[in-house]
Amino acid sequence: MSAFAPENSPTTPDDAIGRERRLIFIIIINIAVTAGQLIASVISGSLALFSDAMQNLTDVTALIISFTANRLCRRNISPEKTFGYRRAQIVAAFVNSSVLLVVAAYLIIAAIIRLFDPQPIDTGIMMLFGGFAIVVNGISAAMMWKGRNDSMNMKSSFYHVFSDFLTSVAVLIAGALMSIYDIYWLDSVLTLFIGVMLIGLTGKLIYNTVRVLMQFAPQDIDIQDIEEVALGVEGVSNLHDVRLWQLDDVHLELTADVEFDDDPSLSEVEERLKKIESLLRRHFSIEHSTLQPEQETYPHKGLLEDD
């Protein structure tokens, strides 16, 4: 039997406020880096530096979306929004990753075109701003490291910043090599590498966010294991119409119909359902489950079969 534990645990309001303050600071310094790199890429003629600037621009966008999503997630539920804004971070992670994927495709195309027509580059400016970006992105990544697994959205934002840190390192090294050996085609090769790396970083995250948005069951939970746990409770003969989904990357929801092979009293039914809920919480971290009691039917309905 698999014992599922979610990737993250809920954070406190103080955690959310501290995370927002870090995001504000990171947004400000990344805006400064992006502006500097864009200007420097035009002056130096470096496509790699321009690609690093574009990646930094997506970092800023991603961080602003993260900041907004964190604010939305703290709003209370209402009669019109019974789940509140819990999926705001999932939507933000999907947008972040999708934008980065588009940027990666653009960089790959631009690099291939430039590869057949290398251009002279002012490597001094390229290395200067590459080094500046290393410092800023290194600070940003370090500040986000602790909370990177708080949610898919924060993980997406961390990937943005950390990948740009690696890119800046590569830009600095490439600038040094070009200044020594005049191998300007290396600028295009580096840009191509950056684009491929970005696609690899974002592909899995997009897949995971789509699974949540499509209300798929968590990959780490086997529905058969849930049935096994429920049938282990005395008097339970069948479980059907099971629906399991993720509200976000922390909260799991489950609904199911539970059949009994005897004629329990109301208090016995309540006791058995509470025991099932407790087992689901213990073994699968399903904090909220809605179980509907039914008398046993023949033949038994399938696990996913509804009424």
Image (cartoon, rainbow, N blue to C red):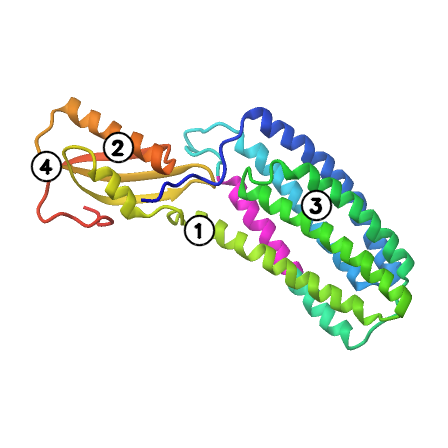
Question: Under tag 4, what secondary structure?
Answer: loop
Q: Is residue 177 left or right of residue 28?
A: right
Name the residue type under label 4.
Asp
Q: Which residue is mark 1?
A: 211
Q: Can you say whether 124 is above or below 74 in the image?
A: below
**How far is the residue under mark 3 from the one under mark 1?**
26 Å
| Residue drawn where x is 62% and y is 27% of the image | 17
Residue placed under numbered mark 4 in the picture: 261
Q: CA distance from mark 3 to mark 2?
A: 46 Å
Magenta part of the chain: 87-103
Spatial CA span between label 2 and label 1: 26 Å
The three-letter code of the residue at mark 2 reads: Ile
Q: Is residue 153 above or below residue 167?
A: above
Q: How dense is the environment of label 3, judged by Cα within 10 Å: few (below 14), some, or many (20 and up)?
A: many
Q: Earlier in the sequence, mark 3 or mark 1?
A: 3
Query: Could you tell me which residue is drawn at 10 percent across and 37 percent down?
Result: 261
Measured as percent of width and height from the top left, residue 1 is found at: 31, 44
- Circle 2 packing at 10 Å, graded few (<14), some (14-19), many (20+), is many
